[in-house]
Amino acid sequence: MSEQKSDFAKLREKAGIPVEELASLCGKTMRTIYRWENGASRPEKLAIEKLKNLVSSSEGNYELNTPRFTFIDLFAGIGGLRRGFEPLGGKCVFTSEWNEYSQQTYRANYGFSENIAGDITKISADQIPPHDLLLAGFPCQPFSIAGVSKKNALHQPHGFACATQGTLFFDVARIIAHHRPKAFMLENVKNLVNHDKGKTFEIIRNTLEVELGYQVRYRVIDARSWVPQHRERIVIVGFRDPNDFRLDDMIIPNPMSGPVLRTILHPEDGTELANGNNSKYIEIADGSVKNRYILTDHLWEYLQAYSAKHKAKGNGFGFGLVGPDDISRTLSARYYKDGSEILVKRISGNPRRLTPRECARLMGFDAPQGSDFVIPVSDTQAYRQFGNAVVVPMVEAVAKHMLPWLAAKQLGFTDLLADKEMVSVG
Ligand SMILES: C[S@@+](CC[C@H](N)C(=O)[O-])C[C@H]1O[C@@H](n2cnc3c(N)ncnc32)[C@H](O)[C@@H]1O
């Protein structure tokens, strides 16, 4: 190697990116990068451009030609996690979702060219590209802890492969084990912690912290701070390399000052146009919600009788009746059945269900009065998809909170870590 540093080597150092990172960013071997640095071969123009972008980003002029981080979207549903991370400069490099209707909605919103892999249990980790961040809202299933204890007693080898085999968390763990991304964010129902008397969460934590060696933080967050819905979810964030990231210092806006349902309901006063994305749900003439969302006498009588029966037994209410100044209960994947958890009061007559557009707003896929999210599927499928999804602004808040550690690592810019103001939440 020559004594004098080449311009290329100086540029790489200024960009603050290690040779290994640059090699993976350019799809080259480290040897090639060293050859470019010592003048043995001419650097590619694209590599020079990438470095210049990195330099300008460190000088506060970041260009998104180069993603800040890459991520994979597992159990993607309709992309709630993706929607929170992509706007921060994340690039999705792999998606898995096996439900064909969710795939339809996913493609309609993130591009018809999106290549969506199906059943994750059938995909080997080496078919998945390297990535900085793994995102997964995996379905929760019980683990057989008895099997693990027996193996312990017999001094047989075990580890996460044994402890989690046959569950979808196993697939998350094996992908992390193979790729060792810088970070992951997992999302699940609040009850994951108590599921199967706490055994499920114990195995998940043990697998992530002990077997895979990640630094794990978790927190239950109520989406009520951002949307008019009480929806508690557990967020689990892991970093491969030890750092000072915490979730308990994430600033969450006061839930008592969160928005109310008025912000997401169709105004029904003619001010909302029944154009392209909304004509399925509201009348063109006056903007009122279509009759098919109003409960039939039969269903409304049934729900009231059911509720009265359970109230008499001290079991609480069977349905949730709400008005514009309320917040709703948790939208569930079974909302399509009778809509009982969120029934909207009407001035007269039977209550109605939310329309799928209102569900898109209630889950933060659309802005409060927005109608941009494309819903290409039947109402039944749409209710299922939104009921299964994650609240987008909640994910955005977590993503912003993670960004200084995620992007600073990726770019090698420690000054980003200090720039907390740029990413402060709330
Ligand atoms: C709880 S939902 C996640 C929703 C997602 N976070 C969102 O915002 O839309 C779980 C998703 O995993 C999908 N799924 C379940 N088992 C799967 C498998 N073996 N392979 C791929 N997808 C699967 C389901 O179809 C469902 O859409």
Image (cartoon, helix red, strand yellow):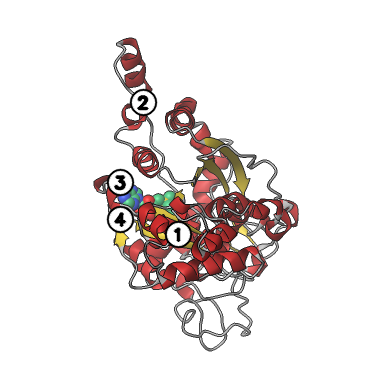
Task: Please state which of residues 66 and 127 is positioned toward the viewer in this rendering.
Answer: 66
Say which amino acid is labelled 1.
Answer: Glu
Residue that lies at the very extreme toward the left in this rendered image: 122
- Find out whether the residues at labels 2 and 3 contact each other: C-beta distance under 8 Å: no
Residue at 37 percent of width and 61 percent of height: 40
Q: Which residue is mark 4?
A: 98
Q: Is mark 2 within 8 Å of ligand 1?
A: no
Residue that lies at the very extreme toward the front in this rendered image: 3
Q: Secondary structure at mark 2?
A: loop
Q: Quadrant of residue 245?
A: top right
Q: Specify few, some or many for label 1: CA neighbours under 10 Å numbering under 14, 14-19, or 20 or more.
A: many
Q: Secondary structure at mark 1?
A: helix
Label whose residue precedes the other's in the sequence (4 or 3): 4
Q: Which residue is mark 3?
A: 125
Q: Nearer the viewer, mark 2 or mark 1?
A: 1
Label whose residue precedes the other's in the sequence (4 or 1): 1
Label whose residue precedes the other's in the sequence (4 or 2): 4
Q: Which residue is mark 2?
A: 159
- Residue 265 rendering spot, x and y as whole percentages: 60, 70
Label whose residue precedes the other's in the sequence (1 or 3): 1
Q: Is mark 3 within 8 Å of ligand 1?
A: no
Say which amino acid is labelled 3.
Answer: Ala
- Residue 35 rendering spot, x and y as whole percentages: 39, 58
Say which amino acid is labelled 2.
Answer: Gly
Q: Is mark 4 within 8 Å of ligand 1?
A: yes
Q: Secondary structure at mark 3?
A: helix
Q: Which residue is mark 1?
A: 37
Say which amino acid is labelled 4.
Answer: Trp
